[in-house]
Image: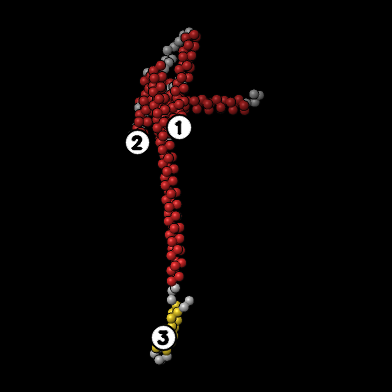
Amino acid sequence: MGGVALTAAGSSGITTRAAVPLLETGTMDWLSPVSGFVGTVVGAGVSYFATRQAQANTVADARQARLQAKQDQAVTALAAAFGALHQHARHVPNDRERWTGNEEAAALRATCDTWNEQLQNHIAPARIAIGVIRDSHLRHRLDEAMKLLETWNSGLENAFHGRDRVWLLRGIIAHAVDCVGAWQREEPLPEPNHAFARARDSLATKEDEWEAEAEAREEERQRRAAAPGD
């Protein structure tokens, strides 16, 4: 690299010479393409991350759309199932009357079995739709409503006492409908109506009785197993 000799007089009068290098024009020539390359890389990186973010947003939006579509389908299925259950409850058998003949008792049992089978057929699609609901509080309440309906002929014995069966079963279904409506409006779930609360208490009492009976049977089984000579 070339230079220009400069002369300067020091305090001693001695003249010194120093070579000061000059930047050659070629130096700037190679810096320009390097700067351009760095800018291209940075720009490409920004573009890449922006594209990835846009893709991520698109995927998230698509997932949210699918989830919302499933929720809408579940609500539609529940509306159909609840409507069918509401109509079916009108024909619930009344076995409170005491039949004296064996044929009459057998006919009543057959009627109850047929009605119960149809009830389970209506509950099945409702159960599937309930499983899709993402809100855990709503899902739990609807599951409870279906359980009350499923155990109508055993768990709701106390609730039926002195009450119209149609009123009780339709009240359970009505509360389930009210819960779905509140959820769609983004409101808190309503408190159980009188029919739902009565059915819930009845089932809880019967479950305690069933548990006590099961424990008694198990204790009896263990006693017999431990008895000598048995």
Report the residue that reaches farthest toward the right: 229
Q: Which residue is mark 1?
A: 131
Q: Secondary structure at mark 3?
A: strand
The image quadrant where one finds the C terminus is top right
Q: Secondary structure at mark 1?
A: helix
The image shows residue 14 at horizontal and vertical percentages of: 42, 90
Can I make out residue 206 in this image?
Answer: no
Mark 2 vs mark 1: which is more N-terminal?
Answer: 1
| Residue at left offset 41%, top offset 83% | 6
Residue where numbered disc 3 is placed: 7
Q: Which mark is residue 208?
A: none
Provide the residue designation for mark 2: 186
Comes first in the chain, label 3 or label 2: 3
Mark 1 neighbour density, 10 Å: few (under 14) some (14–19) many (20 or more): some
Pair 3/1: label in front: 3
Camera-side residue of 92 and 31: 31
What's under tag 3, amino acid-wise? Thr
